[in-house]
């Protein structure tokens, strides 16, 4: 095997030649073979032996990943290859396929220019296949297709050659339909994958063979030859006439773009600054001699070096001693070391230039999505996660002496994975950790126990609800406790189209920058006056200044924003987060003396009328739902339909093929959070396979609301009876 330091040296030698760089992510549904495929590329680069490729699963390097044989976090590795007598770099990211770890996929898409979509043709296009491809296309990362486990069609399903061709052709057509649906308008046709042009490979990553038009031409082999050898299970011959590493490498290099090709069309999508400025031109041209501009897409913790910021360098060359700004931090920071990742190891190097992926040491308080730059430029667009945390557990240290260690562990874990949300329950002192699903929380618990060596206790899973309103209430008055200032607000439901813009990331959370948001909101159905008055976005809700000429309002606006954000973080009905709320400050009478309008006066004076207005409008709970794809033998179809309906579920679609059936259903998280796995296995004698995905929030049925509200309030140490609007009006 080749030393990783030697590979790193080879990478550094050619990294300034941006035409020879490929930034690529391997994406797929869970267990479709991403990491197995990655092994073959590592073997070609000399990182691992070819004999163990497919078994070692090198990029699943954490103990918990090895135990479960599942990718849980994205793994970055920079490799050098010689192809057609030219040296190339492939900065490769192996991403997770399980829906609970989709946040890692989202972040990785910001770093890459192309993706290899891996699909198992027996399972076909699964929920996460569509999700990860959509995320890639929205970030303008071009796809190629690797159809893995092709041998299953012949050896397990016993399909004929003709049936196999039909199955594969349909799969390619279905993938292209998704590309047409999600790709940018100008790339819908250009990015379609096809066997003819070589952007599709068929093979078996585990058995280390793959065929494409390129391989067929070079090795004088046909599909018929491959079928014959597959049926004969002659793996040695298959590897000889259809080498997987060569097939995959040629597809990546010839069909995925270099940074110099990709950045001119990706940059306008990811960065909304002025492209005509010095930094705009430098990033468009991937200029290594310009000022450094990069976006952080990962944060890792190293016991020796502290926090490591992992980012895509869009311009300049970052090295030890570079002074940079980071989003939201006013002072410059000095880079103490840079390196490249080789899977589990970080290899220090002298410098990393534009178009590459850098691991940077020495930056404090930098988060995923932050922009790092020498000239303190307009930040890159926020990285928006498509799923929301829907399940919570209370986690506490068994020994109070470990409390500070637990707090630090949770801080590090939530920094590495922004889809984890950590809050302190003020009433109980417990740490509430929210994640995408039960598996996500289980992994967090395991890491705390095994990696951080902290004995912990955990509660049963808790569902996260949201509070919202359907009607509006006008002219609600809020007074400061000293009666010197008054604020008047209108409470309205936020337009659903605007909520969608926030959830998609098109409208950013926080205070708006500039006026670009105005036309976007008007197009979505908001009045121009309201759009122009927007002062803050939080929890899918908006605070709008609809006043005219109110004295001293600007001086207390920060406190009003703080009060608004506290209100929507902790609603009046069940102390759950609020969503879809529009708060308009319509008038105010503010005391001229700043002494009489401090935080203790102003914050409650805006929170109380928001709560009173919401309760007057009628607050209701929304519950999270998941969309399940359930594969079962047809004999169990009626039992599963009854089971789904018994879980307050809705059957959306039923597909039947041969002896198998697929049910697509939407169910409330509250109904499937406990015991779902055991129940469905019991009904089907263990023959069901299911895949959940986030399906948003919907109104909780009215007949359940009172019971659920009381349960939540009791759990949070609140009186079971919810408050009335009059409780907040005096």
Image: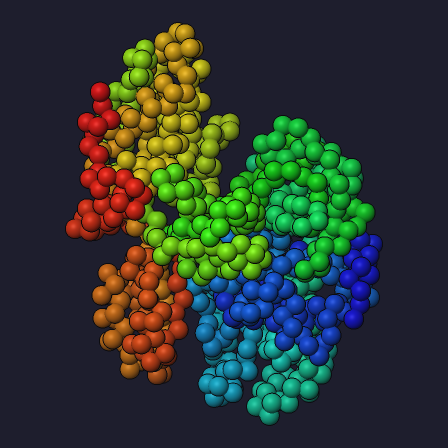
Work out whether residue 52 or residue 149 is closer to the camera in this orientation and state it. 52
Q: Going by the image, does 387 lie left or right of 2?
A: left
Q: Compared to 146, does 497 lie above or below?
A: above
> Quarter-wise, where is residue 709 in the image?
top left
The residue under the point 41% across, 26% down is: 561
Q: Is residue 704 left or right of residue 264?
A: left
Any part of residue 187 in sight = no
Q: How is the image coloured?
A: rainbow
Q: Residue at x 54, y 79 (%)?
A: 150
Q: Position of residue 729 (x, y in %)?
A: 22, 23
* Residue at 53% over, 48% down: 402
Tell me residue 76's x, y (percent).
65, 57
Q: Percent x, y for residue 238?
A: 66, 84
Q: Is residue 70 above or below residue 429?
A: below
Camera-side residue of 370 and 268: 370
Towards the viewer: 174 or 4: 4
Q: Quadrant of the N terminus?
A: bottom right
Residue 53: x %, y % from top left: 67, 75
Residue 558 visible somewhere in the drawing: yes
Pick the front one: 561 or 655: 561
Q: How many marks?
A: 0
Q: Residue furthest bottom?
A: 232
- Which residue is painted at 45% across and 36% down in the image? 509
Q: Quadrant of the C terminus?
A: top left
């Amino acid at each position: 095997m080749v030393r990783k330091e030697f590979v790193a040296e080879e990478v550094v030698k050619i990294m300034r030649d941006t035409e020879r760089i490929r930034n690529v992510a391997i994406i797929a549904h869970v267990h479709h073979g991403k990491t197995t495929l990655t092994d073959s590329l590592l073997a070609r680069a000399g990182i691992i032996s070819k004999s163990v490729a497919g078994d070692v699963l090198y990029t699943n390097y954490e103990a918990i990943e090895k135990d479960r044989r599942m990718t849980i976090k994205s793994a970055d590795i920079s490799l050098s290859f010689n192809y057609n007598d030219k040296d190339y770099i492939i900065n490769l990211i192996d991403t997770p396929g399980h829906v609970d770890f989709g946040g890692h996929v989202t972040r990785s898409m910001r770093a890459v220019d192309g993706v290899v979509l891996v699909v198992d043709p027996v399972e076909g296009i699964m929920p996460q296949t569509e999700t990860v491809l959509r995320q890639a296309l929205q970030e303008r990362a071009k796809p190629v297709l690797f159809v893995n486990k092709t041998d299953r069609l012949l050896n397990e399903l016993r399909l004929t050659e003709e049936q196999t061709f039909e199955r594969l052709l349909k799969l390619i057509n279905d993938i292209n339909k998704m590309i047409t649906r999600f790709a940018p308008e100008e790339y819908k046709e250009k990015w379609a994958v096809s066997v003819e042009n070589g952007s599709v490979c068929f093979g078996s990553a585990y058995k280390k063979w793959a065929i494409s038009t390129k391989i067929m031409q070079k090795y004088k082999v046909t599909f018929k030859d491959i079928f014959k050898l597959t049926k004969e299970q002659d793996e040695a011959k298959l590897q000889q006439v259809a080498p997987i590493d060569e097939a995959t490498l040629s597809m990546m290099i010839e069909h995925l773009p270099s940074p110099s090709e990709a950045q001119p069309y990706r940059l306008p999508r990811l960065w909304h600054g002025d492209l005509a400025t010095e930094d705009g031109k430098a990033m468009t041209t991937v200029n290594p001699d310009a000022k450094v501009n990069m976006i952080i897409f990962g944060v890792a913790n190293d016991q020796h070096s502290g926090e490591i910021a992992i980012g895509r360098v869009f311009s300049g060359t970052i090295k030890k001693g570079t002074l940079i700004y980071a989003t939201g931090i006013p002072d410059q920071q000095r880079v103490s070391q840079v390196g490249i990742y080789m899977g589990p190891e970080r290899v220090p190097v002298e410098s990393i230039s534009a178009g590459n992926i850098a691991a940077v040491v020495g930056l404090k308080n930098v988060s995923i999505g932050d922009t790092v730059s020498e000239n303190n430029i307009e930040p890159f667009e926020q990285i928006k996660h498509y799923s929301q945390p829907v399940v919570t557990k209370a986690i506490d240290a068994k020994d109070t002496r470990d409390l500070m260690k637990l707090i630090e562990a949770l801080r590090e874990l939530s920094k590495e994975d922004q889809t984890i949300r950590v809050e302190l329950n003020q009433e109980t002192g417990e740490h509430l950790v929210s994640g995408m699903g039960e598996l996500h929380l289980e992994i967090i618990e395991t890491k705390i126990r095994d990696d951080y060596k902290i004995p912990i206790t955990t509660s049963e899973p808790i569902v996260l609800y949201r509070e919202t309103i359907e009607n509006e209430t006008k002219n609600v008055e809020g007074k400061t406790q000293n009666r010197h200032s008054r604020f008047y607000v209108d409470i309205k439901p936020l337009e659903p189209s605007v909520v969608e813009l926030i959830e998609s990331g098109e409208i950013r959370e926080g205070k708006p920058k500039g006026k670009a948001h105005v036309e976007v909101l008007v197009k979505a159905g908001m009045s121009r006056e309201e759009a122009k008055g927007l002062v803050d976005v939080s929890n899918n809700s908006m605070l709008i200044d609809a006043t005219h000429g109110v004295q001293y309002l600007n001086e207390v606006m920060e406190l009003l924003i703080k009060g608004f954000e506290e209100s929507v973080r902790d609603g009046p009905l069940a102390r759950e987060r609020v969503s879809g709320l529009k708060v308009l400050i319509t008038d105010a009478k503010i005391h001229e003396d700043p002494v009489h309008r401090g935080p203790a006066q102003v914050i409650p004076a805006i929170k109380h009328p928001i709560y009173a207005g919401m309760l007057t409008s009628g607050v209701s709970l929304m519950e999270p739902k998941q969309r399940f794809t359930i594969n079962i033998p047809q004999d169990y179809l009626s039992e599963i339909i009854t089971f789904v309906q018994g879980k307050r579920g809705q059957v959306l679609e039923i597909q039947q093929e041969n002896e198998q059936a697929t049910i697509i259903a939407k169910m409330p998280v509250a109904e499937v959070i406990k015991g779902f796995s055991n129940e469905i296995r019991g009904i089907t004698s263990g023959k069901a396979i299911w895949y959940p995905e986030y399906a948003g929030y919907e109104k909780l049925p009215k007949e359940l609301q009172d019971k659920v509200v009381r349960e939540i309030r009791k759990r949070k140490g609140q009186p079971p009876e919810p408050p009335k609007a009059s409780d907040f009006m005096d």
